[in-house]
Image (cartoon, grey):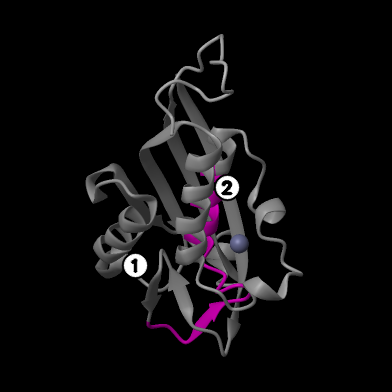
Amino acid sequence: MLRVGVGYDAHRLVEGRKLILGGVEVPFGKGLEGYSDADVLCHAIMDAILGAAGLGDIGQMFPDDDPAFKGVSSLGLLYTLVEYCRRRRDIQIVNVDATVVAQRPKLAPYILQMRALLSKAIGIPAERVSVKATTTEGMGFTGAGEGMAAYAVVMIEETEQPEEVEGNGRRPGKP
Ligand SMILES: [Zn+2]
């Protein structure tokens, strides 16, 4: 069965932080504020994967009052999350499509690198991980440079669960 999930995230832009998007450090005078590295693109993708799998949301999985996640790489969290979803459910991620909304800086030079890193973390080919960037033509909080936002859609394929479970409680074909 095919399942789809949607994710959205936004973070404030502040001085004195690195700007990390899709695991790539993008040179810019400011960075996104947050408990982890505040990688808004990774966070939107993570929420979309959890949504498609029906396994809650990123705040439940990685609470932002847990010291373990302070300053942590969201790309690493994405890898952990995909492994978790695969353990919990018999799923394959089919493709990811994401859009980063940012007035500045120009993200085009970094898109290929973002796709490469994201595809490695998710475990699918880069051609199935789409990252796009857009502005809001100066409108709203992204247009004013107060913050950045990201949207993501993820499709997953879940193997049909057999009606009857074998005597040992395991599903056939699963170790
Ligand atoms: Zn976030």
Is residue 153 visible in the rendered image? The answer is yes
At 61% from the left edge and 33% from the top edge, which residue is drawn? 54
* Pointer 2 residue: 47
Is residue 35 visible in the rendered image? The answer is no
Query: Between marks 1 and 2, how big is the CA–CA gap?
Result: 22 Å
> In the rendered image, which quarter contains the N terminus?
top left
Going by the numbered disc 1, the residue's amino acid type is Leu
Number of the label disc, if any, that sits on residue 107:
1
Q: Is residue 22 left or right of residue 165?
A: left
Residue 114: x percent and y percent? 33, 63
- Most foreground residue, 1 or 32: 1
1 and 2 marks in contact (CB < 8 Å) = no
Going by the numbered disc 2, the residue's amino acid type is Asp
- Most foreground residue, 155 or 130: 155
51 in the magenta segment: no
How many residues crowd mark 2 within 10 Å: few (<14), some (14–19), many (20+)? Answer: many
At 47% from the left edge and 77% from the top edge, which residue is drawn? 19
- Most foreground residue, 102 or 3: 3
Residue 127: x percent and y percent? 23, 46
Judged from the image, the quadrant occupied by ligand 1 is bottom right
Residue 106: x percent and y percent? 34, 70
Q: Which residues are magenta?
A: 27-49
> In the rendered image, which quarter contains the C terminus?
top left
